[in-house]
Image: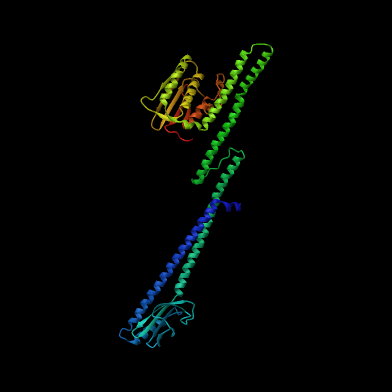
Amino acid sequence: MRGELLKSTPLRLALSLSAIFIVSLTLASVVAYGMVRRELAARVDRALTDTFAVISQSYGDNDIADLVAAVESHAGTVIDGNQIFRLTDGSGAVLAGNLGPVSIASGWGTYPAARLQLGNASHYRTLGGAVGDNFLVIGQSSAESDAIGGLTLAAFAWAAALLTLLIVTAGIIVAVRAQKRLDSIAGTMRRIGQGELAARIPPSPRNDDIAALAGQVNAALDRLSALVEGMRQVSVDIAHDLKTPLNRLAITIETAIEAEQNNLPLNGLLAQAQSEGEQINATFDALLRIAQIEAGSRRERFAAQDLPALLESVVEIYTEVAVERRQALTLQPARGLALPIAGDRELLTQLFVNLIENALRHGPAGITVSIAVEGNSDRVVVTVTDTGPGIPEVERDNVFRRLYRLDKARTTAGSGLGLSLVKAIADLHGATIELADNRPGLSVVLVFPTSVTER
């Protein structure tokens, strides 16, 4: 677990961000420390300048006694040698102060305490200048500035250490929680790989990117499960629905062999065998056609199609078929409106042909099949209704399955692939399809987008 955690992307990201923060904080601390040191040095210089001016003013009437007294007064207030004062005459003799006869240059200077023969380890900032015929030197120890600087540096160091600890701890906690969620996703995928197609990533109350990823993975797994279940169901349905015609074909061939041995006529049996073979071949052709459509290869043939005009041509052909069956077929197109969609004309024709044939074949004499078209700039809606027996609500999802047939429909010709083909063509064109009760009969509502969307 520890090794896996060290390899985790969330933890590495947290540690990388922590390292960036630590480097940034260190640079900021160095800059801030330098600014504090410069400010402390500037304050020392201002204090020395002010003190030098005060002492110099005591020599206003060339009264050396007042000048000596001022220097002695300031030197007398010094504690722990943090300040130095010295007044020398023109010959270099010390007149007053707490600093011995060491050489100090005029103007600003910085000297170590040892150089000034003082017993501490600090440095002194000095200012020397003439006061009349005399030479005045004053200085300030860096001990206080060093102490303040040290405290500042220590404060920055402690702050950096505490913040680093908090950031690394928080980063590890966040990384561990994120890794657990990623492990949950990985675990689900392992279960899927082992054949447990019902496994799903547990939902998370957090509305973040990992939750969105989990939702997308679950949606993909739902589609995968549906496809696998569809393939399994197709295999079962093929085995079930083709077993009867194959058995009939085998019996017909066996009967034909016996008839040939007995010198009986074979034409009828051969015609029956041919019919059975053609029906089986048609079923497989339809299955292959559905697979081809679902693969999306026909999308390359899409062009602008006028649905009202296409429906008029289909209805014109099947009107006579309906009349022969003593049924009615009507079309109510959207008059005066151009309702083009992007699609394959051949497949769209097949879609509406299947719906019309399905309604006419399974409906008794006297029913009416009506087709209506309406739409706007966003979508086109085609409604196919009939007054036939309809489809029970519990069966409306099943009828789109390959080879699925209602019990009452098994007495009529067909393979159970008509509505499966309709669904595949609708999906290819980005259309939705819904079955509803027409009271009586069935209502099929197809909604086409004006532009094809990827599904």
Residue at the image point whose x is 52% and y is 31% from the top:
294
Q: Is residue 433 left or right of residue 107?
A: right
- Location of residue 242 in the rendering, given as x and y in whole percent from the top left corner: 60, 24
Q: Is residue 47 above or below residue 430?
A: below
Quick one: 79 or 224, which is closer to the camera? 224
Residue that extends furthest to the right in the rendered view of this protein: 261
- Location of residue 320 in the rendering, given as x and y in whole percent from the top left corner: 45, 16
Residue 170 at least partly seen: no
- Location of residue 184 in the rendering, given as x and y in whole percent from the top left corner: 57, 45
- Picture mark count: 0
- Where is residue 411, by image quadrant? top right
Q: Is residue 416 above or below residue 179?
A: above
- Where is residue 303, by image quadrant? top left
Residue 351 at least partly seen: yes
Residue at the image point whose x is 50% and y is 55% from the top:
17
- Location of residue 142 in the rendering, given as x and y in whole percent from the top left corner: 45, 75
Residue that extends furthest to the left in the rendered view of this protein: 61
Quick one: 59 or 286, which is closer to the camera? 286
Q: Is residue 407 left or right of residue 60?
A: right
Q: Is residue 235 above or below residue 90?
A: above
Q: Is residue 365 above or below residue 36?
A: above
